[in-house]
Amino acid sequence: MLPRQVDVLVLGSGLAGMLTALKAAVFGKVLLVCKTDQAESNTAWAQGGVAAVWSDEDHPDAHVVDTLVAGAGLCRREAVEQTVRGAPERIRELIERGVKFSRRDDHPHEYDLHREGGHSKRRILHAEDLTGGELVRALIAAVAQEPNIQVVEQQLAVDLITEANLTRRRGLLPPATNRVLGAYLLDRPSGQVSAVSAKIVALCTGGAGKVYLYTTNPDIASGDGMAMAARAGARMANMEFVQFHPTCLYHPHAKSFLISEALRGEGGKLIRRDGGRFMPEYDERAELAPRDIVARAIDAELKKRGDDCVFLDMRHLDRAALQHKFPNIYRRCAELGIDIATEPIPVVPAAHYFCGGVMTDLAGESSIQNLYAIGEVACTGLHGANRLASNSLLEAAVYAHCAVERFGPGLANLPEPEPVPDWDPGAARDSDEQVVINQVWDEIRRFMWNYVGIVRSTRRLQRARARIEFVQREINEYYWDFTLTAPLVELRNLATVAELVIESALRRKESRGLHYTLDYPRSDDRLLTDTVIERRI
């Protein structure tokens, strides 16, 4: 049973959500809402690890510089400093909560540190090549021991409830400061929509990789938190910066399987079909260049040669080393008939991570009072125009801490959450036309891939804008005519995210980081500012 009121409503059960819930439970009652099962999240799919200065041979200043360089001038330095310098303490906390990071074979008392693209030192703590799975395992166990946390599964957030929204419905002028009051939740099995009010709402809903045809993300990554926040009037920033991971396994039966950047950190080489390397032709850092450079290089090679994929060569490591360092990748490739000890791995880029999102301050609070955004759903300024590898899980851990550090001590003094209106379905009726949702979903993902992908142009973006405007009208009509279902809610959210990405990309008339356009192929420091979109309520 869903409570009508809670102190803290946490939407999302990945690293950001579970850590926020655990920390907030010290101060009040928490409802942790899981879209499907508690174990299913973007976190669970993370392979590489968590970046943190852990070795005496490393220094926080080096991690700061690496992050700023990867971010191509758009990082918020205060966010970078806060995240990097808070990293070791957050790692220690995860270890105390039961996370078991991999240790060195030669020095079992020391943690094994990987190096990934853009990093000047080895600083990636990992759990073999299934770091996300280990984080989820440990945190689920910790959440289960906390009596102040109620976990509900199979609940999809539909929309945020805000003061501005309610006053508008009553025909009154919106308040000067908008404040979040709760959210509407759709019970997936029954289709029932419930209203839950809260003093604090934390969006920990992850990214929106499913807005693209090819992605490393799970099916649940439909941009729900981003879309809800945008509709509620929150400031959204830098949505044009979508990171395409350079190496997703290319195989007809390998849906969304990531080939971790850690393989390139261990000496893996990208090669063409003829066996020749190409990365040194694009960047002096070769395979260890930041992700935007590697992804564009692969995209250029595929278009130049008409090939379906390039290959990642790991044959410099023997079978025992590959099985030990990358057991999950070795096993999955073997299941598909690829022996990575004797043959290169076919790979292509795929949509992976959103560097933009709900614009927040250094504690994760959005422009809507008491609404926090933590993890990939947020734009804190850490990533700038391109995320440095393995800074994402770190950001989630640091900002979960910073958020609760702000709202936690004063939680008891906040006004009790006021009752919010029940969901009004109007004259909506059941639909027997699921094919319509499937068709529009597929259309969005295809034109986003073709027109708003790794390489863009003004003409392609304008075509995408024309398509999304038409699709949005079609979705809105359908949305209000028929009873809510999870696919319909997700489709609406995908369309909102697509619209934000397209509009942001059209506004940025330069190439920077993950946004590369043929019409403005150079960076222009006169445009060195965030792209901010705020919907009027």
Image (cartoon, rainbow, N blue to C red):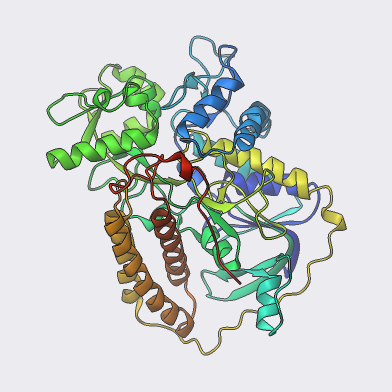
Query: Residue 137 appears at what percent x and percent y?
Result: 56, 40
The answer to whether residue 155 shows anywhere in this view is: no
The answer to whether residue 284 shows anywhere in this view is: yes
426 relative position to 82: left or right: left
Query: Residue 305 appears at what percent x and percent y?
Result: 13, 38
Residue farthest to the right, as pictured: 413
The one nearer the camera, 516 or 329, is 516
Looking at the image, residue 197 lies above or below residue 408: below
The one nearer the camera, 99 or 496, is 496
Q: Name the residue located 82 percent from the left edge and 54 percent from the top edge.
A: 411
Q: Name the residue located 53 percent from the left edge and 74 percent from the top edge.
A: 190
Q: Name the residue located 29 percent from the left edge and 49 percent from the top edge.
A: 519
Q: Name the residue located 37 percent from the left edge and 37 percent from the top edge.
A: 292
Query: Residue 404 appears at what percent x and percent y?
Result: 74, 46
Q: Quadrant of the C terminus?
A: bottom right
Query: Residue 63 appears at what percent x and percent y?
Result: 55, 24
Q: Quadrant of residue 325?
A: top left
